């Protein structure tokens, strides 16, 4: 490893290329090749799509206030939840956690000046807004109606918008794949001298195990989407059993992507939590290696469990047991992480910043989502609740209570690194409590609604479920208000927030050793790393950072 880092630095490799900072609005902010600007572009775009996806969510909750529905026809309702789910997965959570926070932070944390392929990075960002607009344009021609999973045969029958959906998600997939390659090469080749694998901050580990998932799993999705598109537009019978195709083929390909994709949506969030908890309890993270290696175990196991989404799809009984056992195994590395996080808090000097509160909220709600995941892995239980609101409850506990809370913890934590200012803590605390209460009030009742038998994805339902649906709807407005408050806080703080200085939290990883906002080149002198992060009692584990906080551009290396 030392050999690789040494040759990169000595051979005039990527790490020490210095180019003048681009001038002019377009080169600087629109077609930027700077990983930090691209990260912020991803975040702004994803938050805009979150507003659209959130409006659809509220339409869903308004419709479900009354058992007899009321505001939408069933057809429109199908379009609304299908686009809502697709938005939240592909245009919000994945872009925020990989393209957004990934780009913004991890290159700095390994001591690099940029990612390995800056132009590819710009290209993968610029595939994202058009793909999102295509998804929304599908409303004009009949949006997809078969949910975010778009199972055939239903997805073969929908209006033209379903083909548009397939094309849009395909574009997003291409973008994800490029990001994965870029991040993997960056982490393998561009770490600062001394930044060995076991000295990498845990957020870097989160991106490191996510990158191969982005590359490998997304390929399966791309193939499935292409096949769906080709069957719909040109009639090749991939999924049509009457002509030798198989609708189950879609489910296998889709879940061979989408189960690993749930880890694309959670492993980077694990990384954020692993940064926030030690910083605000002033203790080294407990079980660093266990946290890092359990992420690898999760990534590998994640490829072996996809058929747990197909227990009710006519999967051969002989296959049910192995998929059940493998799925349950994932609870082990996940549990290891949860115990490590709790042990990190134990005896720590806890500072209740907003970021810390979101991290603690994550611990509580993600754990509950993980537990219902183990329930679902049990085939007899799954046969009972598959296709009910119990699934909706489970997936929102992991995706909103896990991934999105991780995003919010990261937003409050790293906001100074983007803007040089802190977000308002008082508003932040309000937003946290509104979010936590609103979220649990919305999704907790769905567990029992599901067990009692309320089916998901229907526009009208049995009147006996109306009471709890109203509860869920009212709390969903509270949760939305919390997110609006976060957004307002972020916008207000750009100008009015308290100046943060380089290291407001007294954190130890490299991004905090340079000015806020982070300068164009990140580092004047690429630092040397001689110990692991997070050891708050020891001196900083870096050499060569003395100049970083003084003004002016970095010296041009003499070699070229
Ligand atoms: C211990 C970890 C987990 C286990 C054992 C687990 C297990 C399961 C199982 C068995 C199902 C299928 C239920 C059915 O369709 O009948 C399911 C659904 C789902 N899970 Fe998990 N899960 C876990 C964690 C996660 C995480 C971390 C995420 C995302 C961040 C996630 C997202 C989802 C989603 C989106 C669905 C619903 C798919 C659909 O629309 O049909 N799960 N989970
Ligand atoms: Cu799964």
Image (cartoon, grey):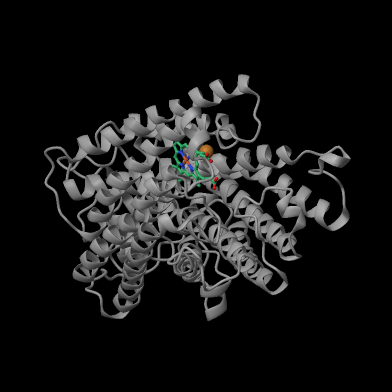
Q: Is residue 58 visible?
A: yes
- Farthest front residue? 463
Where's residue 253, x and y in %?
68, 40
Where's residue 216, x and y in %?
62, 39
| As drawn, 304 above or below 351 | above
Which corner quadrant holds the C terminus?
Answer: bottom right
Q: Nearer the viewer, residue 333 or 502?
A: 333
Q: Nearer the viewer, residue 270 or 66?
A: 66
95 displayed left or right of 238: left
Q: Nearer the viewer, residue 547 or 305?
A: 305
Q: Is residue 547 visible?
A: no
Q: Residue at x 49, y 32 (%)?
A: 3
- Image quarter for residue 438? bottom left
Q: Residue at x 24, y 34 (%)?
A: 286
Where's residue 201, x and y in %?
35, 43
Q: Nearer the viewer, residue 111 or 256?
A: 256
505 displayed left or right of 245: left
Q: How many marks?
A: 0
| As drawn, 390 above or below 122 | above
Where's residue 177, x and y in %?
62, 49
Q: Residue at x 33, y 34 (%)?
A: 337
- Image quarter for residue 36? bottom left
């Amino acid at each position: 490893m030392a050999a690789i880092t040494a040759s990169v630095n000595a051979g005039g490799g990527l790490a020490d290329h210095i180019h003048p900072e681009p001038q002019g609005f377009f080169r600087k902010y629109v077609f930027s090749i700077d990983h930090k600007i691209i990260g912020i572009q991803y975040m702004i775009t994803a938050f805009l799509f979150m507003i659209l996806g959130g409006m659809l969510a509220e339409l869903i909750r308004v419709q479900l206030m009354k058992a007899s529905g009321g505001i939408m026809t069933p057809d429109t309702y199908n379009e609304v939840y299908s686009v809502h789910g697709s938005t939240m997965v592909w245009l919000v959570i994945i872009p925020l956690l990989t393209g957004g926070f990934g780009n913004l932070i991890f290159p700095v944390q390994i001591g690099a000046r940029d990612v390995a392929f800056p132009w590819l990075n710009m290209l993968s960002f610029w595939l994202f807004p058009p793909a999102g607009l295509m998804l929304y344009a599908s409303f004009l021609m009949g949006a997809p109606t078969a949910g975010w999973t778009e199972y055939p045969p239903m997805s073969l029958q929908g209006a033209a918008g379903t083909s548009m959906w397939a094309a849009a998600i395909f574009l997003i997939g291409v973008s994800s794949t490029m990001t994965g390659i870029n991040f993997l090469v960056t982490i393998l080749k561009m770490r600062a001298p001394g930044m060995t694998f076991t000295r990498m901050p845990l957020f870097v580990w989160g991106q490191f195990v996510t990158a191969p998932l982005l590359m490998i799993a997304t390929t399966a999705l791309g193939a499935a989407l292409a096949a769906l598109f080709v069957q719909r537009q040109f009639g090749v019978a991939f999924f049509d059993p009457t002509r030798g195709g198989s609708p189950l083929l879609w489910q296998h390909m889709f879940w061979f992507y989408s189960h690993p994709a749930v880890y694309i949506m959670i492993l980077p969030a694990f990384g954020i939590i692993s940064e926030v908890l030690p910083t605000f309890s002033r203790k080294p993270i407990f079980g660093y290696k266990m946290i890092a290696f359990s992420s690898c175990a999760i990534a590998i196991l994640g490829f072996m469990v996809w058929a747990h989404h197909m227990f009710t799809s006519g999967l051969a009984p002989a296959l049910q047991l192995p998929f059940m056992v493998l799925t349950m195994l994932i609870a082990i590395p996940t549990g290891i992480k949860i115990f490590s996080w709790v042990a990190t808090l134990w005896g720590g000097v806890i500072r209740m910043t907003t970021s810390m509160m979101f991290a603690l909220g994550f611990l509580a709600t993600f754990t509950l989502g993980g537990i219902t995941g183990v329930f679902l892995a049990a085939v007899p239980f799954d046969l009972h609740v598959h296709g009910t609101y119990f699934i909706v409850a489970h997936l929102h506990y992991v995706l909103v209570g896990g991934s999105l809370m991780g995003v919010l913890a990261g937003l409050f934590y790293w906001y100074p690194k983007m803007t040089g200012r802190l977000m308002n803590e008082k508003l932040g605390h309000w937003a946290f409590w509104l979010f936590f209460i609103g979220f649990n009030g919305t999704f907790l009742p769905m567990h029992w609604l599901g067990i009692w038998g309320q089916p998901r994805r229907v526009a009208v339902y049995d009147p006996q479920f109306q009471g709890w649906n109203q509860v869920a709807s009212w709390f969903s407005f509270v949760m939305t208000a919390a997110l609006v408050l976060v957004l307002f806080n972020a916008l207000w703080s750009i100008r009015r927030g308290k100046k943060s200085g380089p290291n407001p939290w007294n954190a130890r990883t490299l991004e905090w050793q340079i000015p806020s906002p982070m300068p164009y080149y990140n580092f004047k002198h690429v630092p040397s790393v001689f110990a692991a992060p997070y050891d708050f009692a020891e001196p900083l584990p870096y050499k060569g950072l003395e100049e970083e906080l003084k003004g002016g551009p970095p010296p041009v290396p003499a070699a070229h």
